[in-house]
Image (spheres, grey):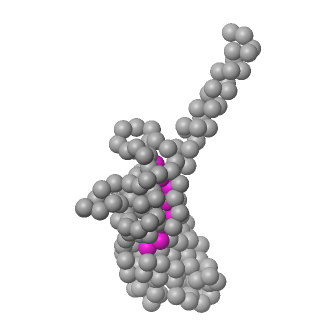
Amino acid sequence: MGRRVQQDLCLIGLAVAVTVIFPMMAWAEITEVRLGIEGPCPHCAEVLQETLSGIAGVDTVQVSVEPPQATLTLKAGQPLEVEKLRNALAAKGFTPTWIRFEAVGLLTLHKGTIGFRVQGTAQVIPLESDGKLDAVMQAVRRDCELVFIVGLIPPGQVTARIERFEVRGLLGHPC
């Protein structure tokens, strides 16, 4: 095989890796969760860190006093359990406010409304029906198109409002 053919094959392999394999590796599950918390003091931040770290499925936790929030990552395949997080915080005397998450998944019909099925889990997060959801639905032209969203779940709710989105492409296998 000539050197030119080998170079071409290497370039084709690299192109496949960059466009198919690497993006799919980055398209997994919930990538980040941020929790708004009413006014934790520096000492309270330690208790908050321990509380969130002790929840099954939580991988890493970072707590900030200013702005008052916690940033966490979940273990692979772990769904975002909104009530579990809120209840754990309330049990320690904290007042959780909003929950913001970044995730990749698919739009799906769930219990008569449009939801977001998180890639790598069975979880479906209900979505607020608004202009952003309409924009996502127009942008997703085919079934099985992965969508990256930044969603906000307001205090006391389980329905997410889409803040930002990006259509990432077709899923690598049938839905």
x and y percent of residue 9 in the render? 65, 21
Task: Indicate yes or no whether the magenta region holds residue 25.
Answer: no
Give the answer, above or below, for where 33 lies relative to 63. above
Q: Residue at x 62, y 82 (%)?
A: 67
x and y percent of residue 63 in the render? 59, 77
Q: How many marks?
A: 0
Q: Quadrant of residue 160?
A: bottom left
Q: Quadrant of residue 45?
A: bottom right
Q: Residue at x 50, y 55 (%)?
A: 148
x and y percent of residue 73 in the render? 52, 64
Give the answer, above or below, for where 46 lies relative to 112. below
Locate residue 121 relative to residue 21 in the image: left or right. left
Q: Closest to the observer: 1 or 15?
A: 15
Q: Residue at x 67, y 24 (%)?
A: 10
Q: Which residues are magenta?
A: 146-153
Q: Quadrant of residue 108?
A: bottom left
x and y percent of residue 165 in the render? 52, 59
Q: Kindly tell me whether residue 68 is visible in this rendering.
A: yes
Q: Closest to the observer: 26 or 88?
A: 26
Q: Quadrant of the C terminus?
A: top left
Q: Quadrant of the N terminus?
A: top right
Secondary structure, magenta segment, majority class: strand
